[in-house]
Image: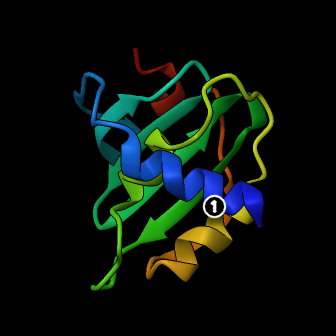
Amino acid sequence: MARLTHIAALMLTLAATGAQAASCTDGGSTYTSVERISANVVYAEDGARAIIAVCSMNMAVEATDTGGAEYPARDFAVGLNPNNADYDLTELASLMRSMGLEAQTTPFSSKGCVCAAQ
C-alpha cells in the first residue's frame, strides 16, 4: 500500500516532459504520441488505448479512459521510478483501475517500434 501511495504522490508532483514522435506502425497497430519516459519505459497511444511499455520486461499496461478518470494514463508512466528495472505492472494496473481507468497487463514486444523510439 505504501508503494501505491508513493506512485500516486510522484504522479502529482512530476511535470510533463519528453519529446514526442509523430507515430510508428507495428503489425496492425499504429501508435501515436510515442514518448520515451525513461530508459525502460515508453508511453504511446493506439487510438483510445494508452500503452505504458516496460521494454526491459517485454510487458505493458494497456489503459482506456472511458470517462471520469482522476489522472490520464500518461501521468502513471511519468510517475514510475526511472531507476527501477523491474516494475510490478499488476500493481500499477490495479492502481490505475482504482482511479477510474480500465487497465490490464499484457505481453509487449521490446523489438517493436514503440521500444525503439528515441
Residue found at x 48% / y 34%: 42
Which of 34 and 81 lies nearest the eye of the viewer? 81
The answer to whether one can see residue 27 in this image is no
Q: How far across and how far down the image is residue 87, in percent? A: 75, 43
Q: Quadrant of residue 69?
A: bottom left
Determine whether 74 is above or below 69 in the image: above
Quarter of the image where the N terminus is located: bottom right
User: Going by the picture, which residue comes out furthest to the left?
Assistant: 22
Which of 35 and 18 lies nearest the eye of the viewer? 18
Which of 62 and 97 lies nearest the eye of the viewer? 97
Q: How far across and how far down the image is residue 62, in percent? A: 53, 62
Residue found at x 78% / y 52%: 88
Determine whether 41 is above or below 99 in the image: above
Determine whether 80 is above or below 115 in the image: below
Q: How far across and how far down the image is residue 33, in percent? A: 26, 40
Quarter of the image where the C terminus is located: top left
Q: How is the image coloured?
A: rainbow
Left or right side of 114 for 14: left
- Residue, disc 1: 5
Q: Quadrant of residue 94?
A: bottom right
Secondary structure of the residue carrying tag 1 is helix
Q: How far across and how far down the image is residue 68, in percent? A: 29, 85
Q: How many marks?
A: 1
Determine whether 67 is above or below 44 in the image: below
Residue found at x 57% / y 18%: 39
Q: Residues within 10 Å of mark 1 (few under 14, many from 20)?
A: few
User: Going by the picture, which residue comes out furthest to the top?
Assistant: 118
The answer to whether one can see residue 62 in this image is yes
Which amino acid does the dot numbered 1 rest on? Thr
Residue found at x 33% / y 47%: 30
